[in-house]
Image: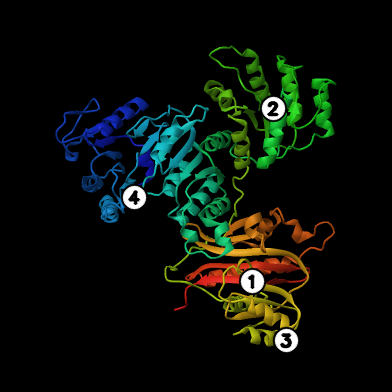
Amino acid sequence: MEPLSRFLSPRAIVVIGGGTWCESVVRQCRDTGFSGPIWPVHPKKSQVGGLPAYPDLASLPGTPDAAFIGVNRELSVQIAGELSAMGCGGAVCFAAGFSEAISELSDGDALQAQLVAAAGKMRILGPNCYGIVNALDGVALWPDRHGLVPCDSGVAVIGQSSNVLINLTMQRRGLPLAAVVAAGNQAQTSMADLGIALLEDPRITALGLHIEGISDLPAFERLARRAQELGKPIVALKVGSSQQAQEAAVSHTASLTGSDAGARALLRRLGMAQVDTASELVETLKLLHVTGGLASVRIASASCSGGEASLMADMGEVVGIEYPALDETRKSALRAALGPKVALANPLDYNTYIWGDEDALTATFTALCNADLALGCVVLDYPRDDRFAAPEYDQVLRAVAATRQATGTPMALVSLLAEGLPESVATKAIQMGITPLCGMADALRAIRAAAQIGQGAKGSAPVLMPQGGHGASRVFSEAEAKALLSQAGIRVPKSTRAACAQSAGSSAAQIGFPVVLKGEGIAHKTEAGAVALNLGSAQAVTQAAANMPAQSFLVEEMITGTVAELLIGVTRDAAHGFVLTLGLGGILTELIRDTASLLIPASRDEIRNALSGLRTGALLTGYRGRPGADLDAVLDTVLALQDMVQTHADRLHEIEINPLICRACGAVAADALIRMEESA
């Protein structure tokens, strides 16, 4: 396969087609500053985009490194074959009507396969995509406007929506955007392939991804490994919530997870930051470009307004930002800079006593940020530059730069409103080594995201991907499910099955009272009135059975000594693997929604950390004098369930223990649900 570097940074370009789009590609390449030859090809036109056109590929004066194919889908296949035969490095396939349109065009999949076959070793981008803009080398194989300007270094963004990418190039927040690539259908060249090639370029500092779906998970794992080796951060905006992981789902777990939880777990595992909006993506990329990522969410904040300081504190608490309290050394230095009238705190309102005094501003920011911090922030909104000159605001900017030099702490300007930092100021700040963060809410979320970089499971095993699992599945009875759990080494209650209400009473006597009675064949028993607890006699069991909407019953020992109830579930996610969900169990599971998701296989430490990160995690360790649970027994249970999933990965659809009764000594699976295909 041709190296992507040749395609992404070509020395000669060919544009095939004569329509408006191809005219635009020629003009965009010239306007972006491409200095190499651009060869339009059209069988009838003498000019395309103001340049002389060649009648066919055979007439070209040389071999192109990159091509833009702007003809219909059938002809695109033929052209791809001709380009490959002449040794072209890669081609953008602009045409639509391939696999993305399979519902309307039944031959879309077949035609896409023909395109890939025709390309051979030549790289194909798309089909159904706009292509590439590379501002580092002046390349614009792109049939529309874009907002990139020539630069020496910057970030790259890869996306699956060309229009989203166009909008990102038009940002006015000072982001040094070096390249954008539209991946299209990824018929041959994947987003991960493109990401690795871009990160290999020493001029690219960070990578942003706009992901609608992940089709090749092992490739994404390779991208993450290479990014870690190069020390370059990745941030992703993941959109789209398919129902793949929830089709025919019957467990509580499936309703709590879905593909979004799988995607979040995957990105976290791979050490990629995740954001939820396009503006957060832009702000995070700026922070990554300047800092390379943050060591933590511990920051300091300074502003000349108590209102801004309060907003930083309140918004920061919502997104999980930490403002370490001031130690005596910092307090002493701040008091010397600010005098006795200013209340000292973090976030700091330094008031307006020192406004206009650049030395005092520098002393204040230096005193505040001379500590073990991931980032120092100074809140500053410039006045409208179309109405006011603001030289005193530039004093703050210079003081922030001096603080970075004096303390070594990464520094950021944070505006309350996005328009509070004009593009010219943002650009100047980056040149001074300061991150301009536009809009306080986006800024704080960007800080949190930048602190996620590299926190994945380094050296972890590849994600367990579902194999097979496309046949008909059935919900196993609770007795069958618990038998499988028991075989896997998971503690379950003593139990027996009863075919009628009368035999349920006599069976209970054999187990010993008190007992639990459950109606069989019902997925959510509590909601259906098919569970009765703490029954103390055979007569009580018989009466309870008669009142249940069931024909057969499961009689179990009553587990006592409960410290906490957990949900442990696994759902099959075709795109991201098997999603392991841990959370508060029992009847309040979906109401409280206190869960954490991991991908299988997860390590014991990852599982422990996920449990401790739950809002209700203190129930496991002891809360207000209550005893703690046997955490080792809980971890043993989760790992045993994980082993069971790996054993049955070819046919398992979902499995859930809810609740796992956690006791001071041991843990017991009190209820279980399994949906799985029959074994061959």
Residue at mark 2:
308
Dot 2: element: helix
Q: CA distance from mark 1 to mark 2?
A: 51 Å
Residue at mark 3:
509
Q: CA distance from mark 1 to mark 3?
A: 21 Å
Dot 4: element: helix
**Which mark is first along the chain, 4 or 3?**
4
558 horizontally vs 271: left or right: right
**Which mark is first along the chain, 3 or 1?**
3
Give 109 or 103, whichever is nearer the viewer.
103
Tell which tag, 3 or 2, sits nearer the viewer: 3
Give 620 or 210, whichever is nearer the viewer.
620
Q: CA distance from mark 3 to mark 4?
A: 62 Å
Above or below — where is 547 with respect to 100? Answer: below
Disc 4: CA contacts within 10 A as few (<14), some (14-19) or many (>=20):
some
Tell which tag, 1 or 3, sits nearer the viewer: 3
